[in-house]
Amino acid sequence: MERPFSLLIKPASADCNLRCTYCFYLDHLQMYPDEKKHRMSTPVLKQLISSYMAMEMPVYSFNWQGGEPTMMGLNFFKDAIEFQKIYGRSGKHVSNSLQTNTTLINDEFAAFLAEYRFLVGVSLDGPENIHNKYRVNASGSGSHNRVLKGLRHLVNNKVDFNFLVLVSEANVDKPFEVYNYLKSLNVTNFFQFIPCVEFDEKGNKLPFSITGKQWGDFLLKIYYEWEKRDRTHVSIRNFDAIINKMVLGKPHTCVLDNNCCQYFVVEYNGDVFPCDFFVEEKLKLGNVTRNGWRYFLNTGKYRKFGQNKMKYNRECRQCGFVEFCHGDCLKHRKYGQENFQQLSFLCEGIKSFYRETLNEFRKMAADIKTRNIAR
């Protein structure tokens, strides 16, 4: 069996019907200046799916993102499912996920997602006054009401989904307001929090980004509220990932791993890159219409990129928490210069979070192991 990997697919590239102020991916359209509209063609889709499903994988994991992937329209995803049926093999498992702002989801689209068991990630930053600060359309109008409209279609069709919250300057100081709002919607108990960390070309933090201390404070407040009231019935991916690593001995998220070779990004035209945050011409590995997945896995450029995670700062090597963050995401170690030996911009907050919670997570993991043995 090949080393397992998943695909993060950008069928509409960075094209989106919104213009969120903090979006890091819009700049990537500069890579494809000759086309104003970016849409994955049927031949590229077919080659992408057929070649991937020819590999020996425990699960064929297709993660559809953007930009806004639903701009492709429902027929595109119907074609994707048909190709998965054609090139899939008996007994093999296929997983589809979709990250969306939901504003283009209607009842028919939601019914399709439910029928084929897509796991949907819904981008929602909190109540209207918070969400609308940065998640806006081209005219500057907030998207909150349209998000809830699409969300209702998901709920009515019993689609599995979770909330993904980007923690920015708009909500980092309002953890309880955000967390309680998500719970009050009473539609899912699965949440994930992502830090907004963006820099200008000189390495200066952009205004909507957060600091390490803010990130640590936010996570701690969420943790204590969750641990006190919701541990048995609310799933927070940030916390689940830590416990899973303790129980299973291996990470399920790249942030907790010591190597970044976990998935490939596939752009609308079939170009392949090693990471969502590093879709750069100099890191392009090839194209699915010309190269195979074994080539991508074994190319020196991909292996070297993955190994960058172990280029720790000297402080990291002496840190008691390094086995859980491994210096953090490379994106947070690269600001202003190509130097992955810098401390993570979020280091202060990461350490404060683990300092307060790691022993409790160890107790939770031990309890899970004990209960599993008892079975």
Image (tube, rainbow, N blue to C red):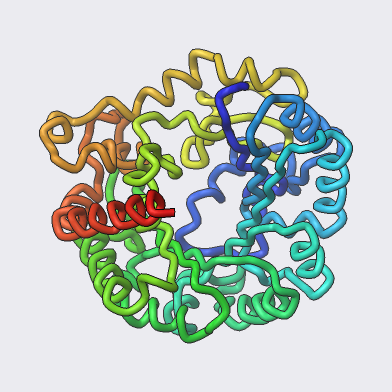
Work out whether residue 43 or residue 193 is closer to the camera in this orientation and state it: 193
Residue 141 appears in the rendering: no
Residue 133, percent across and down? 45, 75
User: How many numbered dots are placed on residues in this image?
Assistant: 0
Please tell me which residue lies in front, 110 or 206: 110
The answer to whether residue 358 shows anywhere in this view is yes
User: What residue is at 43 percent from the left and 71 percent from the top?
Assistant: 234
Residue at 35% of width from left, 58% of height from top?
Answer: 239
Q: Quadrant of the N terminus?
A: top right
Q: Quadrant of residue 54?
A: top right
x, y percent for residue 375:
44, 54
Residue 187 left/right relative to 107: left
Q: Quadrant of residue 284?
A: top right
The x and y percentages for residue 18 are 61, 65
Q: Is residue 178 left or right of residue 222?
A: right
- Against 222, is 239 above or below? above
Q: Residue at x 71, y 44 (%)?
A: 94
Q: Residue furthest front?
A: 374
Q: Residue at x 48, y 51 (%)?
A: 24
Q: Nearer the viewer, residue 181 or 190?
A: 190
